[in-house]
Image (cartoon, rainbow, N blue to C red):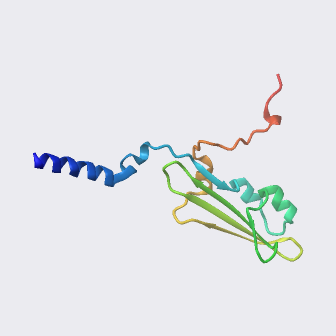
Amino acid sequence: MLFRKFSALAVVTSVLLTGCSVIDRWVYRPDINQGNYVTPDAIELLQVGQSKEQVVFIMGSPMLTSVFGDNVWYYIFRQQPQHGEVSQRSYAVYFDDMGIVKDIKASELEGSKSLEEMNKQGISDPIDTKSDDDIPES
C-alpha cells in the first residue's frame, strides 16, 4: 500500500516538474515579426551616394537613429516563427554632413535565415503587398 502511494506521488511529481515542456508544441504561439520589413529588391536599390529622401522612399522610415546625431539610420528586420528560431537582419546606413549615403553595413544574428528565406516563409500575418491599383475593375 505504501509502495503504491509512493509510486503515484513519484509519477505526479515528475509530471509537475516537467511543466509545459512536454506539451510545448501543442501550445499556440503567434508569429512575431518586428521592425522594418526589408525586401531583397529594396537592398539592391539602396546605394552609396543617395540622399536621405531617396533612402526613406526605398526603405521607409528608420527604426532607430544614432543618439549622437542624425547621421546613422538603422533598419532592423526580426522574425520569429511560431516554434522556430529567431532570424534578424540589420542594416546601418551612414550619411555624411550633407545627408548623402557614404556607407551601408549589414549584419545578422548568428544562425539567421537569409533575407529571401525570411520573406518566403509562410507567416500567419503576411504583409499585403497588393494595392487597390492592382485589382482589375469589373
Find residue 57 and report its horizontal and vertical position in percent: 83, 56
Q: Is residue 129 above or below residue 44?
A: above
Q: Position of residue 46 (x, y in %)?
A: 77, 62
**Residue at left offset 63%, top offset 42%:** 125
Q: Residue at x 62, y 52 (%)?
A: 33
Q: Is residue 86 left or right of residue 42?
A: left
Give the position of the C terminus as an image quadrant: top right
In front: 75, or 58? 75
Q: Position of residue 13 (x, y in %)?
A: 27, 52
13 on left or right of 117: left
Quadrant of the rendered structure where residue 70 is? bottom right
Place residue 1 in its image quadrant: top left
Q: Measuring from the top left, give residue 12's x and y in whole percent.
A: 26, 48
32 in relation to 67, above or below: above
Residue 22 lies, with reference to residue 102, above or below; the image says above
Query: How many callouts does the rendering have?
Result: 0
Please, which residue is most extreme toward the right here? 98
Q: At 63% across and 68% down in the image, what residue appears? A: 107
Q: Nearer the viewer, residue 138 or 19?
A: 19
Does residue 138 sit above or below 59 in this rendering? above
Q: Residue furthest front?
A: 2
Drawn side of residue 41 relative to residue 19, left or right: right
Q: Nearer the viewer, residue 82 or 47?
A: 82
* Side of 91 relative to 12 (left or right): right
Residue at (83% x, 26% y) in the render: 137
